[in-house]
Amino acid sequence: MITTHTSICRFCHAFCALKVDVEDGRVVRVIGDKDNPMYHGYSCVKGRSLPEQHYNPERLLHTQKRGSDGTHQPIPVEQAMDEIAERVQEILTKHGPRAIASYSGTFSFHYPVGAALGGAFMSAIGSRMTFSSGSIDQPGKGIASALHGRWSAGPQSFDESDVWMLVGANPVVSMWGGIPHFNPARRLHRAKQRGMKLIVIDPRRSECAQQAEIHLQPKPGEDPTILAGMLRVILEEQLHDAKFLADEVAGLEALREAVKPYTPEYVARRAEIPAEDLVSAARIFATGRVGMASAGTGPNMAPRGNLTEYLVLVLNTVCGRWMRAGEVLPNPFVLLPRRQARAQAEPPVPAWGYGE
């Protein structure tokens, strides 16, 4: 007899809602939960393959320890934890907290509580040497945020936007990079139905790029060139949010001078894109009522990744794309302490000194 259970996928950060069929104590099928009001039945091939992963004959089912002969043998998990704790304590006593580092990535800590427990452990021993898939493949985000400063109330909501720009991101496949990861393909489809215009900067004609009003397909690594060119167009044509910049932002004139050389013609030659498409993308993004730009993993791994992420933030700021006083937060948190957002700027902080 088959019984169906409601669960969530633990393969990645999207936590998709699932229906799990169990027969004689064995999982036989995993599908998306159509009754879930956030995911609407969505699940990806990785989530649906969890039974195959779970019952893989090569899966380790017991804690292993390497012996002096180099082979591994099963040991009780309690023994393993005791031995690991003893060794970690030795390192901590001899070399200090910074000798111990942690890394968490997709499926390396069992979602959703593993990363939180890992972070609490590192905090308890006093080590700041915490790394993740984000610090490895998207380091520009943290560095750019430190150099640029933050807006305490956070970015504008995708579900309210009439324009959106993705720089080297394809979230309908990756579930990351700009579109909320609760069934991103459906969210993008519904956004376009209500009239949202999508701009994509990507050397590859990705699934998102195929749905874009404008797809800028540059020579790889020229993302900051395009962003600087867009900023020049927006400032030259006075499409920026002048009041927001006057009230909240410093450095506008320095920015204006910095992007002055990035004319549409120069950007077109350097990035190998049509100049008219660059101008159209800048105008569409700047004249939208609500919307954001975001960058994915690719631009962070390319040359000048920090600069790409910084210019993405600058573009959002120049167009005033941050939540304002009186607006409804898209995610005030439910199971975590309620978010106390303020519509005000946080100044830049040093973007260095995090560790060797």
Image (spheres, rainbow, N blue to C red):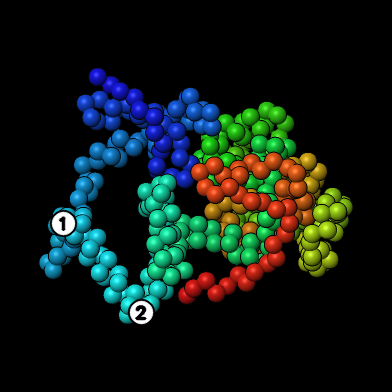
The residue singled out by tag 2 in the image is 95
Give the residue at x 48% y 61%. Answer: 136
Mark 2 packing: few (<14 Cα in 10 Å), some, or many (20+)?
A: few
Q: Position of residue 322 (x, y in %)?
A: 72, 50
The CA span between labels 1 and 2 is 28 Å
Q: Quadrant of the N terminus?
A: top left
Residue 75: mark: 1
Secondary element at tag 2: helix
Residue 297 shows in the view: yes
Give the residue at x 73% y 37%. Answer: 162
Q: Position of residue 147 (x, y in %)?
A: 66, 67
Give the residue at x 25% y 38%. Answer: 55
Q: Is residue 24 left or right of residue 253?
A: left
Q: Position of residue 303 (x, y in %)?
A: 58, 63
Vertical arrangement, residue 45 with respect to residue 279, above or below = above
Q: Which amino acid type is shown beneath numbered disc 1?
A: Ile
Tell which of 213 and 36 is nearer to you. 36
